[in-house]
Amino acid sequence: MTTRDEFEMQREAEKLEEAVEEASNLAEKLGLDPYPVNYWIVDYDEMNELIAYGGFQQRYPHWRWGMQYDRQQKQGQFLGGKAFEIVNNDNPSHAFLQVSNSLADQKAVITHVEAHADFFNNNEWFGLFADDPDAAAMLARHADAIREHMQDPEIDRADVERWIDHVLCLEDNVNQHRPYEPIDLDEEVPEFEAADIEADLSDLDLSEEVRRQVFDDEWLEAQRDDDAPVSFPAEPWKDVLGFLRKHGKQYDDDAGKAVEMTDWQRDILEMLRREAYYFAPQKMTKVMNEGWASYWESLMMADENFAGADEFVTYADHMSQVLGSPGFNPYSLGLELWEYVENTENRRHVAELLLRVEGLTWRNFHDTVDFRDVVERLEPDPMVDAIDADDLEALDPEDPRVDAEALARAKAGDLDVAEYPWKVLTYEGMAERHYSLVKPQYRGFLGHISQGELERISRYMFDDARYGSVEEALEDVDYTVGWDRMREVRESHNDVTFLDEFLTQEFVDANEYFTYEYMRASNDYRVTSTDHRDVKKKLMLRFTNFGKPTVVVADGNYENRNELLLDHQYNGVSLDIEQAKDTLERVFELWGRPVNIRTIVKEYDEHDVEVARRRDREPEPTERGRLISFDGMDFSERELDWEEVEHLAATDIDYDTKPDEWTA
């Protein structure tokens, strides 16, 4: 028997069948290559559950999902937040549409999702997890396995939940720049472990006098194999969860020492580590991915009238709310950057052609070129700009901008050109139809090209007298270069490298970006810079390691005591010491022995602060090394010599990296 809700969802699904099919067709025309997408109609509560579960229908039992569900519901009830879509990285992708959304919202979601699915399919960072394309099945297997552990009468459910809590505090501490690999438990480990020998001696219950006389430091030193390493790993180990999976133990309260993890503990640690690798690309490309989806959604819904005349106002209102929401907005920043990529590539291409006009050089470019005339000549051919069902005979099937097969179907009456005019065009025709430099908001972009960029373009130009006139040069414009460049960038970059390459001074000035800081002198926040380097660095702090502190394993046998030493790779932002201590308590449970973290802290002299306040300037902090330790019972802190922490301080290379350097 079909319930009323099921009937309503079925009716909504049938209503959206054409929109889903045509959005996919339009995405293909625009050069996108998405995963196939399965769309599911869900109600309000189901949507909130999916959001809480990170876009999947089944996850392991844990309190975090209930907390996220409650937060999502409160956001909708009290803050006016509304969930329009959720899509997961899978092949095929699965997208969920809320049944109560308007048709305009549903179409916006569908076009947005098609672009997301294209990004999932083509971005190389998502390809790092391509060994298991069925993510939903993987997460379901993990959920079933963890649920079985919780139901095992030999295992306390509370112990399982606590273990998950310990692992989750480190879920962002994997090596997201490498493909996921299971931990090789057969790999050799250092043979000499002084702490284990000390533990064995303790078990013998020897008197202190005997220990001093027989098992002194000289004897312990003699037990060491000179060829065996006394510390490991040889290089900082970025995959902290992987290191703990391989070398970690649990602390046994009854025995008062570290013992091997149980099978269920190792299983859960590895499953959650695998999930951390799966979700890492989504965190690494939030700005790129949301900007990419917003760009193509806007083009399809507004520029190609995928939103009907009666739907456009609703769509425009909701899109403006998304792009105009306060605070850090990945949709807005991503969209602006993608438009900048398109515009700069189109501008560079046109400038290259114009600099090949006889008599035109980078020195006289701005004085000679009539930019208004150039932009008018770049306007798309009326044939592709305004396709009319009554003028189909004017379209040449041999024209590379025309889809000859679709044109024949349109002439035969098998294709509705009035509803979907883009169907009779090819990718080349669509690129000309939506050429960015002639859009009203960008008509002055070509004229804003700098002398420095013109000089760089002309530096390696040898055929600089190919054309006799500007008109002749513009006949060779390739309207696809902007979109082609966008697809190249989509394949290779993540948010850090994307910002590094394209967040220029021109972009910062045009979009009015700036940095602000808390001022100790005035106890308030103030704008501190509009320099693109400062804006870039500020944003990169948000994206490097997902905005979390970057922590690596420095030594698994610290001071030859089997203690774990973590290094905080300091980027100018000090650790929150109390949070660091909370994390060390969790890490202790995964290591089973004392744990330490080495970091750099900023200290301010109160006298300097007061003097700076009177002079309305900022005091200079002193940076010092610090070691925070936890032995399972107590915390301790001590200052370190600068030589011991100097290697932790960030350099420019932490930000000015390229994808090939990260994956080398």
Image: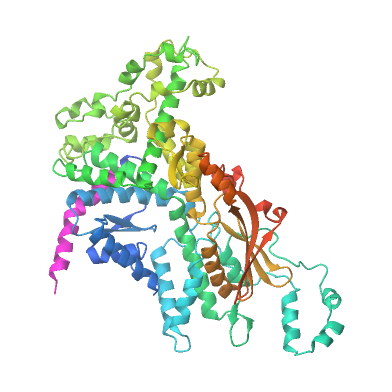
Q: Vertical placement of 425 versus 332: above or below?
A: above
Relative placement, left or right, of 4 versus 280 is: left
Query: Where residue 59 appears, x then y in whole percent?
Result: 38, 70
Give the residue at x 53% y 77%.
265
Question: What segment is highlighted magenta in the picture?
Answer: 1-27
Give the residue at x 65% y 56%.
625
Give the residue at x 32% y 62%.
51
Residue 335: quarter of image: top left
Query: Where residue 228 appears, x then y in whole percent?
Result: 78, 68
The main secondary structure of the magenta stretch is: helix
Q: Nearer the viewer, residue 122 or 176?
A: 176
Give the residue at x 80% y 86%.
208
Q: How many marks?
A: 0
Task: Look at the image and tell me whether residue 481 can be seen.
Answer: no
Residue 100: quarter of image: bottom left
Task: Look at the image and tell me whether residue 417 can be seen.
Answer: yes
Q: Nearer the viewer, residue 533 or 4?
A: 533
Relative placement, left or right, of 15 versus 54 is: left
Query: Where residue 301 appears, x then y in whole percent?
Result: 24, 42
Q: Vertical placement of 258 versus 380: above or below?
A: below
Query: Where residue 424 appears, x then y in whole percent?
Result: 25, 35
Q: Nearer the viewer, residue 24 or 188?
A: 188
Q: Is residue 252 magenta?
A: no
Q: Vertical placement of 384 versus 289: above or below?
A: above
